[in-house]
Amino acid sequence: MPPIPPRRITFIGIGAIGLPMAEQLVRAGFEVTGVDPFTGQREKAAAAGVPAAATPEFAAEADVVVCMVATPEQLRAAAFGEEGVLRRMTAGSVLVIMSTVGPSAVREVAEAAPPEVRVLDVPVTGGVARAITGQLSLFASGDPATIEGVRPTLEALGTIIDCGPEIGQGQAYKAVNQLLCSVHIVAAAEALALAEKLGLDPEKVLPAVAGGAGGSWMLSDRGPRMLQGLDAEVTSTVGIFVKDSTMVKDIADEIGFDAPMITAAQARYQAAKDAGWDRKDDSQVIQTYRR
């Protein structure tokens, strides 16, 4: 396969998962400029070979703008605010929304975009571990020709999953995914907390059950950090899962779907946030069982 020709990408949101994604794009031969309001993240990005700014002035020069922010409010600010990219992007450029923000938020942005700017809905899953290796799953929805045009950009990050031509379908797929993630993390926390309450050594229980029928990717990935306690490395925060589990619950409520599992999981994440752990690693939802 011939090398991918360099193209200009503005990457908004170079946090725990955004920065390794931006690094993957640099390694694939793209010219990448990061955007993040936090000085510390911009310094990390610069050290990793991704020059970064506090505002997206480079969006005017970009072929592709990737948005990897945390919330619908942050997406709206990135798109519509005083420094919003929709005011800056040039004709023919593509805004790729990779944030997990729900169908309505991405449709709002797509509907407000000028006709000369194309928008794709491509939330991702796989966490920091797969962002680092370029093995994310990308739930891509939008105009097929536009997806094809940015295929080299997307494939540098992972595997494209075709979710259909309708903007918002990628977010719908991600909602299903986040129901599973939210519930599996809480289930793993509950299981390991039960082991502790039974007087078992969780360091021995974790490998004993992780490879069996009751194992899950979340148990294997989050379990070790659950045992490390509140000082565990932060790869995804409790606050992110408060947001995501609430989003999934709201979507279920909106369509009249009874979803008791996500309701129970959402209550656990909210309890962890209420205890002051919203900036801790999401594995620390286990602390709600230890109190």
Image (cartoon, rainbow, N blue to C red):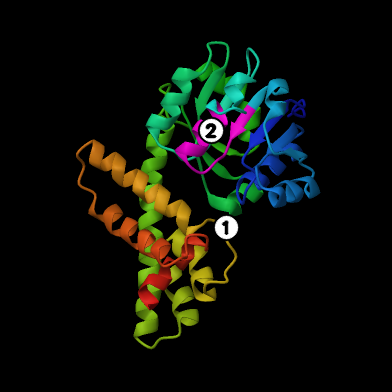
Q: Is residue 31 visible?
A: yes
Report crowding for label 1: few under 14, some 14 to 19, many 20 or more residues within 10 A (C-alpha).
some
Q: Dot 1: what SS?
A: loop
Q: Looking at the picture, does residue 164 appear above or below residue 245?
A: above
Q: Nearer the viewer, residue 182 or 165?
A: 182
Please report the residue visible at 43 percent of the width from the left and 21 percent of the height from the top. Answer: 165
The mark nearer the N terminus, 2 or 1, is 2
Q: Report if the CB atoms under discs 2 and 1 are less than 8 Å apart.
A: no
Q: Nearer the viewer, mark 2 or mark 1?
A: 2
Residue placed under numbered mark 1 in the picture = 235
Q: Which quadrant would residue 78 be assigned to in this image? A: top right
| Front-most of residues 211 and 158 | 158
**Could you tell me residue 182's position as x and y percent?**
39, 55
Q: Which residues are magenta?
A: 65-79
Q: Where residue 201 appears, x then y in whole percent?
A: 45, 85
Q: Residue furthest bottom?
A: 199
Q: Position of residue 174 (x, y in %)?
A: 42, 40
As for residue 77 lying within the magenta part, the answer is yes
Say if residue 212 shows up in the picture. no
Q: In the rendered structure, which amino acid carries the disc numbered 1?
A: Thr
In space, the residues marked 2 and 1 are separated at their CA atoms by 24 Å
Q: Amino acid at mark 2?
A: Ala
Q: Circle 2 is placed at which residue position?
A: 77
